[in-house]
């Protein structure tokens, strides 16, 4: 899992962000949980995988996506609003340039639209992207750090 200062981003940013959002938007929480059985991101997955943070982590040919788990747990386990609908909800931003009618049903709850609960941790200036400034996705994209491993080489002629 990605880490920032030893804190797990999923636990400190994504899940609490969805909890805060749905706490302030209970009618939207009811709309989701009354009409859908759980949320997923890119590819349809089982309900058990949709609630398991490690289900897709580092799996071959599977994207590492976690926001749907934060979304599901925020509603059902933290806010205690159970999903009672019959079909899963894809929570993913629509493709730019396509009509909104063709976007996934859950586009409005993508991490690029949910406010980050600690926006002062997002470096300024914000990166440009499909996400809104000060969103969960803005935090995720803006705080990535490239790590380079320096490899020591041994040259026998140096002895």
Image (cartoon, rainbow, N blue to C red):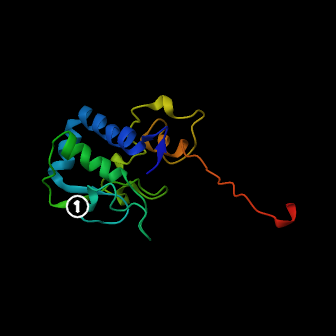
Q: Is residue 121 left or right of residue 90?
A: right
Number of marks in the rendered image: 1
**Residue in the picture at 39% in, 60% down:** 57
Q: Residue furthest left?
A: 84
Q: Is residue 96 left or right of residue 26?
A: right
Q: Position of residue 64 (x, y in %)?
A: 42, 59
Residue 71 vs 159, above or below: the answer is above
Q: Which of 54 and 85 lies nearest the eye of the viewer?
A: 54
Q: Identify the residue under disc 1.
A: 48
Q: Position of residue 7 (x, y in %)?
A: 43, 39
Q: Is residue 15 left or right of residue 28?
A: right
**Residue in the picture at 29% in, 47% down:** 71
Q: Residue furthest top?
A: 120
Quarter occupied by residue 9: top left
Q: Residue furthest bottom?
A: 61
Q: Is residue 1 left or right of residue 106?
A: right
Quarter occupied by residue 58: bottom left
Q: Position of residue 159 (x, y in %)?
A: 85, 61
Looking at the rendered structure, the secondary structure element under dot 1 is helix
**Residue in the picture at 35% in, 42% down:** 11
Density class for disc 1 (Cα within 10 Å; few <14, some 14-19, many ≥20) is: few
Q: Position of residue 35 (x, y in %)?
A: 17, 53
């Amino acid at each position: 899992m990605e880490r920032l200062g030893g804190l797990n981003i999923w636990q400190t940013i994504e899940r609490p962000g969805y909890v805060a959002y749905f706490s302030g938007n209970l009618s939207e929480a009811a709309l989701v949980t009354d009409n859908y059985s759980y949320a997923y991101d890119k590819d349809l997955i089982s309900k058990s995988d949709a609630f398991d943070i490690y289900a897709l982590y580092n799996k071959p040919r599977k994207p590492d996506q976690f926001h749907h788990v934060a979304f599901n747990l925020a509603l059902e386990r933290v806010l205690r609003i159970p999903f009672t609908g019959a079909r899963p909800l894809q929570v993913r931003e629509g493709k730019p340039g396509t009509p909104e009618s063709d976007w996934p049903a859950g586009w409005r709850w993508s991490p690029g639209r949910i406010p980050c609960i600690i926006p002062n941790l997002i470096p300024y200036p914000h990166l440009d992207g499909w996400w809104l400034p000060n969103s969960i996705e803005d935090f995720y994209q803006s705080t990535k750090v490239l790590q380079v491993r320096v490899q020591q080489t041994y040259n026998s002629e140096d002895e």
